[in-house]
Amino acid sequence: MNALLKVRTLGHRYGQRVGCEDVSFDLYPGELLCIVGESGSGKSTLLNTLAAQLAPTSGSVRYRQRDGAWLDVGSLNEADRRRLARQEWGFVTQNPRDGLRLNVSAGANVAERLMALGERHYGRLRNIARGWLERVEIDPARIDDMPADFSGGMQQRLQIARTLVTHPRLVFMDEPTAGLDVSVQARILDLLRRLVHELDLAAVMVTHDLAVARLLAARTMVMQGGRVVETGLTDQILDDPQHPYTQLLVSSVLTT
Amino acid sequence: MTPRYNFAFLDEDTKRMLRRALLKAVAIPGCQIPFGSREMPLPYGWGTGGIQVTAALLGPDDVLKVIDQGADDTTNAVNIRRFFARVAGIATTERTAEATLIQTRHRIPETPLREDQILVFQVPEPEPLRTLEARETETRTLHALADYGLMHVKLYEDIARYGRIATSYDYPVLVDGRYLTSPSPIPKFDNPKLDHSPALMLFGAGREKRIYAIPPYTRVESVAFEDHPFDVQQWDERCALCGSGESYLDEVVVDDRGTRMFVCSDTDFCSQRTEAQA
């Protein structure tokens, strides 16, 4: 099988300070990769660099398009970067209010990416938006409600619908369940697992929560101080951590 | 004419700067061109952009008409007309057909314009995407990439909330198939007059420091959905003064018991028709 994303010695520096450094991995279609690590370990910097929202200071990210051609993400111009981010990728932010357009209705939020791609038929947009609200377990009758009137969990599910409506092949997620209470978290994780499977998505997810990694990801990368300290199958890493930092991380999980 | 001022108030260098911006605007239809907007002897929102464009264009032989919401006799129109009569000594008129230059606030005259006429619009907000995207850097990028999906988000919201596109003025247009442009707050009734107009249309926004243009005979489409096409306002009434059924009508409350009458917003059009009937 061909990789979807090839990352080689990727790094991003904020001036002299290291954001992330020397990261290399391949991501395959249908695979969900988790990046775990404590706050400040460079997870989000890595994610933003992968998603071309930050320019890499070293290394490269290459992406295989639908037509099979490889694209060097670092050297894209703004127009191509936006096209890629809109048609082939998705990005789910930690705070749904960053990823949503709060001054327009839920339906408009879901339909926005379709309109950006040139869909100009109101009735069709409406039907697709309803269908997606249903898929993320929001009552379609709330299609004209403002996202600000939704609960935090609903907002996050709305953001997921808005991102997946164009059927991206690769989704980046930055702690999508942080800041939600445990039962809501479980529901969203369940939903994500189902959608990733249904749509055959590849995804890179950043989290500080090892339970999330255990539930969703086949493969996990552990980061510390901007570097990847351990990588491998999730169960292997969680059950038999090799690196001292990973051991610390695994042993500090609270169990009830 | 007041001799202490340079012809048409602005100094020649400023006029040259304005003309350069105007030429650039005509060369790229619908694209907003920045210019060094000057302080004018009237407040922002009263037509500082339009007045600067007019000042840069006026010649000694020009005949100026100024309208405000279609009317020649409202404060804004009277003041600007008198201002140019004073500082440029040019002839003014209320007749659309006699004017060579028409400065307008929020209307296009009903009388069809000709190739030898120029229409200057006063623009409060030149950026059609502003209500949806507050960052100027972002809207500029969107224009550069012709990335206008956002505009349809607004129209979608309209239909979702009101069952139809409720935007009734400042209705966004796509100029020459390329730039999304605000036609200034004219009623959407006037939008069809922008398409392939024989007259040159210039837009000046003083506070926002932008000039843009729709050159003669340029394709101008009002954006819409396939299943909710663009349409214009219609009235069941006719003008109470001239009986016109095809002009843009203002609803006027005439007493404190709620009696209303409908009259043409274009006073020149209305009075000419009334005279012809008399």
Image: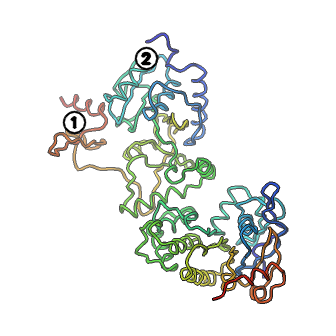
The residue to which callout 1 is attached is: B242
Percent coordinates x, y for residue A217 in the rendering: 70, 83
Question: Relative to B136, is B72 on the left or the right?
Answer: left
Which one is in front, B33 or B135?
B135
Label ID, residue B90? 2
Query: The residue under label 2 is which amino acid type?
Result: Ile
User: Residue B171, image x and y in percent?
Assistant: 43, 49
Residue B190 x/y as whole percent: 39, 43
Judged from this view, the residue extending furthest toward the top is: B3
Q: Residues within 10 Å of mark 2 (few under 14, many from 20)?
A: many
Q: CA distance from mark 2 to mark 1?
A: 31 Å
Residue toward you, A129 or A229:
A229
Q: Position of residue A170 (x, y in %)?
A: 68, 73
The residue most toward the left is B257
Compared to B99, does A92 lie above or below? below
Q: Chain of mark 1?
A: B
Relative height, residue A78 to residue B263 (above, below): below
Mark 2, mark 1: which one is toward the viewer?
Answer: 2
Q: Is residue A231 left or right of residue A203?
A: right
Q: Secondary structure at mark 1?
A: loop
- Neighbours of disc 1 within 10 Å: few (<14), some (14-19), many (20+): some
Q: Give B17 or A242, whichever is nearer the viewer.
A: A242
**In what quadrant of the picture does the N terminus of chain B appear?**
top left
Label placed on residue A39: none
